[in-house]
Amino acid sequence: MTMARGLPRARLGASALTLAACALAGCDGGSPTDDAATASLDAARIEADAPGLDAPGLDAHGSDDAALAPDAATSGEIVELGEAVTESSGSAGELDVAVTITDQRSFMVVATSENASRLSVLSITDPSGATVLRWQDWWDAPHFLTGAIFTERTGTTINWPIRAEDPPLEPGTYLVRIGSYRVDGVTSRPDIDVTHTTITNRDHDLADGVVHVAIVWAQGMSDDAALVDATARAVDHWNEVWGGVGMHVEVRYVESTIDPALPEPSAMSGDVLLAASSLVMPGEVAMIVGETIAGGTSLYGVAGHIPGPIVPSPLGAIVVGWLSNAGGDGVFSDADLTLYGEVLAHEVGHFVGLTHPVERSYEMWDALTDTPECSDAASCEASLGTNLMFPYSICDADSCVSTTILTDQQRGVMQRYTGTR
């Protein structure tokens, strides 16, 4: 289940310009894909020693700057990366991943499987044996908590706890149960090798937080000086938006040979997301900047998963198309730069666990209580239209409504993301 923001367009002949932005590959819980087509996907498993993890980056001014990468010592103390382990899903098509907690704040489990399988998180059990997450509670619910429970992709990622109201971690062993399924998302697929990695975070200071992002230039993009400058300025605005809730982003830039005609994240495009996430350092969020998404300019950007993994994975990147963000003329105006910065902040917001406060169906909302529920375009735009995670842009002929608001509970989700230091 991915979420996206798209370009404005005329709605009902009115002067206001809007576009649906929910690219949910099945808001109803699954999006079956043909087995034969899926078999062509080379969804490589996560490897702890994946090549390219030490790839040099460029800073916002185009010069080498190793200091912009996450500090190795700090990462080792705060964010701890476990080894990749491969296990069979057994005769029942299920396996339990044990997560040992001493004094950590949060954990993430990232799992991948072979390309004709779909994975989902079925439950999380705490050290006392109590079930703190059940897929049944969220599958058909009108509130979206995590994409981990949906059987759409060859991998899954869960971050726990997600919200401030979720019980904090206790010392002992948590069990994360993962199920393997055929591409229909329903039929169990037993005896499948599942590779999983556990990451934990020890930072209990929720007053502020930093997310490290590696912007991966698709081939040739870094040669465009105007795009490089516009992206750096958009990142500055992104930091202004996140700064309102004590969050900060640190960005470095990485070269790649990825085709600038980017795919929309799906079971069929996991090789591209894996390639990008294998170029960045463990603990970083990977964001690919290319020209277009899905062959057009109707999408600003799409997150690979909610939440997204911070180790190499076929779920492990965000895709951004710069042409749509630059507007119809392909030149970044001041208004375009504002929108561009908010698109980057929005998509990484998804990656760290935030969902849209309301979907364009007006029948599904996030699982937070301080983003009001609304039931039609007029009321939703009035109550939530300035929220960073609103699903579409509200524009007139000259500009779009700025989306800079994040609520306390949205901040709580961002702070509990395992990649937030």
Image (spheres, helix red, strand yellow):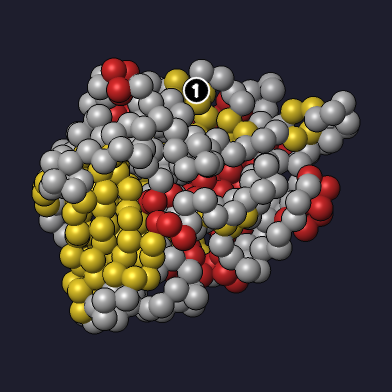
Residue at the (47%, 43%) spot, across then down = 29
Residue 33 drawn at (x, y percent): 38, 26
Residue at numbered disc 1: 294
Residue at the (19%, 59%) spot, across then down = 96
Residue 82 drawn at (x, y percent): 16, 60
Residue at the (26%, 76%) spot, across then down = 129
* Label 1 Cα neighbours within 10 Å, binned few <14 / some 14-19 / many ≥20: few
Q: Secondary structure at mark 1?
A: loop
Left or right relative to 399: residue 330: left
Can residue 214 be seen here? The reply is no
Residue 381 drawn at (x, y percent): 78, 50
Can residue 297 be seen here? The reply is yes
Please name the amino acid that badge 1 sits on: Ala
Residue at the (67%, 28%) spot, across then down = 327
The quadrant of the picture occupied by the C terminus is bottom left
Q: Nearer the viewer, residue 349 or 240?
A: 349
